[in-house]
Amino acid sequence: MISRRKALIAGGAGVAVVAGSATAIGVANREKPEPPSPPSSDGKGHTLWRNWSGIQHSYPVLRAAPKDEGELAALMTAAPAPVRVTGAGHSFTGLCATAGTLVSLDAMSGIVGWDGDEATVLAGTRLGALGPALAAKGRAMANLPDINKQSLGGALGTATHGTGTTLKAIHGDVTALTLVTATGQVIDCDGDKRPELFDAARVSLGALGVITRARLTTTANRRLRRRVWIEPFEEALDKAEARWKTHRNFEFYAVPFTGLAANISHDETDEPAGVRPPSQDDAFLDVLKTLRNLLGFSVGMRKAAARALLGGAEEETAVDEGWKLLSTERPVRFNEMEYHLPAETQLQALKEVVAVIEQKRPDVFFPIEVRRIAPDDAWLSPFQGEPRGSVAVHAWYKDDHAFFYELIEPIFRRHGGRPHWGKLHSLNGPDLAALYPRWNDFLALRRELDPEGRLLNPYLKTLFSIA
């Protein structure tokens, strides 16, 4: 047994030995060119806005950063439309793109109130900053997503989630919120005051107005024990349901062309926090990419090399406060499609996804993330009505990702999946009406709150099937 760290350090050299030639080493080290970048400004001098992965861009005629709800309300009625809000730009869809007004809520951030264990948080607050701010009061968010760069408002708008069968997506812990509409209204709502608006607005894609603050249920700030271990993919499949029932947080990554899966669990502990080693996720990806470059012509050789390099890696553990462990740095850019499937069909869909990738897409090397999320009652929550399991397929930002739509999405749809609102998909109005019982009610409420369509950019018009 060797540590995962040593395996990854040796990985680049190891795959070169497997290939056995200077030519193969050259292939492994050859870097793809950067995708073409849009001009930094358009012909009218408007500056480029681009999302994190680089797949979406626009040239807003106006950029604004209101300091409070009054400034935002005035902006909503007078600024050039479409009015859209951006946080960290981590959505892969065109939700934020606009040729009108792009609003940042960065000036509206921080914890502004407490009511018992509930914190009122401004929507521009980044999740990564909210963790230490809550911890200073001995509190924490119940759960966190894989990435914590998002703003709270963006996380709510797209139903951002973590993993855990008893843990809801972030919007599931919201007990009240404030919305500024396209007509300049500032509306407070919760389960008693305008409850239908509250249930619609918690996940609303920025289509009902701009969420400016939310009241969040918090938990005690506990230490978690994190375990990471690698095992055969079939074993991970067989044990996944039991592990979701056993661990506070559990997820795993199916790694195509290796026959392996990486498991991650988090459980509460009273053990003292220890020194955490540097993350090896980027090194892991480098090894997988090198295996792809060297041995993409042979699934068998690629799997054999991967098992030789990574299959004997020993378990890694870490203990720290939950907000420090649940989210991960992701500097390597990618594009992503994620669907949320009924729990009973999730693992079968995953097996089909892995199989079709290994049959038809030897260029894929990113692991596939597999999580489980508790149900809630927000109208457009992908987890509305029943627990769901997520399967997220990634492609390196330099690689073609058209296979998402051609090969992967049909599997997800056949198994009853709902798309993640911030991830790539091809669904629109009729498709979504069949998946969400309150879809038409949401559209009616949108028309009531934004009769002139000032919040509708081209992407939302397509999504809502508005001509």
Image (cartoon, rainbow, N blue to C red):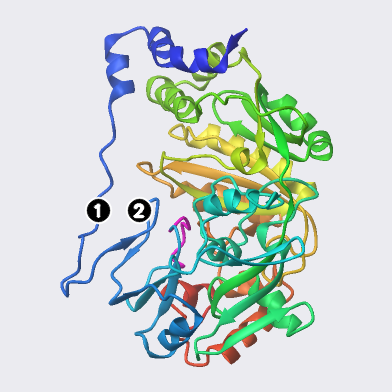
In front: 386, or 275?
Answer: 275
In reply to whether residue 408 is colored magenta, the answer given is: no
Residue 409: x and y in percent read 57, 53
Numbered range of the magenta stretch: 89-95
The span from disc 1 to disc 2 (Cα, nearest Å) is 8 Å
Instruction: Name the residue: 77% across, 54% down.
Output: 374
Q: Is residue 10 above or below residue 174?
A: above
Residue 163: x and y in percent read 69, 46
Q: Is residue 162 above or below residue 206?
A: above
- Circle 1 SS class: loop
- Circle 2 SS class: loop
User: Does residue 301 show up?
Assistant: no
- Name the magenta segment's main secondary structure: loop
In front: 9, or 148?
Answer: 148
Q: Residues within 10 Å of mark 2 (few under 14, many from 20)?
A: some
Q: Is residue 371 above or below residue 92?
A: above
Instruction: Name the residue: 45% across, 42% down.
Output: 395
**Disc 1 marks which residue?**
37
**Disc 2 marks which residue?**
54
Residue farthest to the front, as pictured: 137
Q: Residues within 10 Å of mark 1 (few under 14, many from 20)?
A: few
Instruction: Name the residue: 63% across, 87% down.
Output: 444
Amino acid type of the residue that numbered disc 2 sits on in the rendered structure = Gly
* Left or right of 210 on screen, residue 321: right
In front: 104, or 393?
Answer: 104
Amino acid type of the residue that numbered disc 1 sits on in the rendered structure = Ser
In front: 244, or 75?
Answer: 75
Callout 1 touching callout 2 (CB < 8 Å): yes
